[in-house]
Image: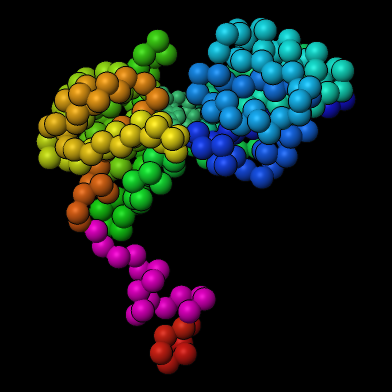
Amino acid sequence: MSKVHFVGAGPGDKELITLKGYKLLKNADIVIYAGSLVNPELLDYCKEDCEIYNSAVMDLGEIIDVMERGVRENKEVVRLQTGDFSIYGSIREQVEELNKVDVGFDCTPGVSSFLGASSALGVEYTVPEISQSVIITRMEGRTPVPEKESIQEFAKHQTSMVIFLSVQEIEKVVERLIEGGYPEDTPVAVVYKATWPDEMALRGTLTDIAAKVRENGINKTALIMVGRFLGQDYNNSKLYDKDFVHEYRGNEDGEK
Ligand code: SAH
């Protein structure tokens, strides 16, 4: 019996799928893709007679039925999910259902949009001595967020933060970030449709970013990036410091 292949589609650009994901798509007999966010150009990689389903108009039961039927007919089934499925990918509930009907699966990761967004800006989330941690979170929507994971709570750390699924409520996000402890002049970026042809990146501070987002009509498919990693301060890493000796590079005395 074949298996269901979960494949991360990447953030948008059709070349940002892994080689392994591309090969799975190319061989697929059935593809179920997340039509709301996956770039449909990725489907150009599929065989002409590949059956294609858009999960945006299906419920969980329908998705599982298509997967189960395909696998029982020994077809190659690909579940193509936006970015990487481990971030807000609802893979857990699909896996639980597949387990119930004894259908196997494997996973091929993808480039998450938070990495597409840092590429769009050419920035590093982990600038030495500025920030060495990244918090990936969201504000509650129809899906609740545990209280101890509120934006205000995380804001106390003042580290690099990437906020998914929340740009439609940018004013509320900003309010909570300030309430939690980020100074008002903290740099913020909002990246809309990172790596797509119509990508848009806005930069500002907690004081003016909400107005910029509204002016540009952004209300979905965007990430809010917050923190001093976006600012002017930085320190070089020790790794490339000529006086820093490590396993692969000795100092002038040949010491390692
Ligand atoms: N699994 C996906 C996230 C799915 S949740 C991943 O790894 O990226 C959907 C949210 O992801 C959107 O509301 C938006 O906040 C973000 N998102 C997805 N693709 C994006 C893109 N290309 N640019 C900016 N944000 C994106």
The residue sitting at 39% across, 71% down in the picture is: 240
Instruction: Write down the quadrant of residue 251 in the picture.
Output: bottom left
Res 176 visible:
no
Q: x, y (%) of residue 169?
A: 27, 18
Q: Is residue 80 above or below residue 64?
A: below
- Majority SS type along the magenta span: loop
Q: Which residues are magenta?
A: 234-249
Depth check: 154 or 223 in front? 223
- Answer with the quarter of the image where residue 107 lies: top right
Image spot of residue 144 (x, y percent): 39, 14
For this view, does 235 lie left or right of residue 197?
A: left
Left or right, 250 with reference to 127: right
Left or right, residue 251 beside residue 235:
right
Give the quarter the ligand 1 occupies. top left
Name the residue rendered at 25%, 53% in the picture. Answer: 130
Q: Is residue 246 magenta?
A: yes
Which is nearer the eye, 223 or 23?
23
Could you say which is closer to the camera, residue 6 or residue 102? 6
Up-down relation of residue 239 to residue 243 (above or below): above
At a point 12% along the width and 36% down the height, the residue shown is 184
Horizontal side of 85 relative to 31 (left or right) equals: left
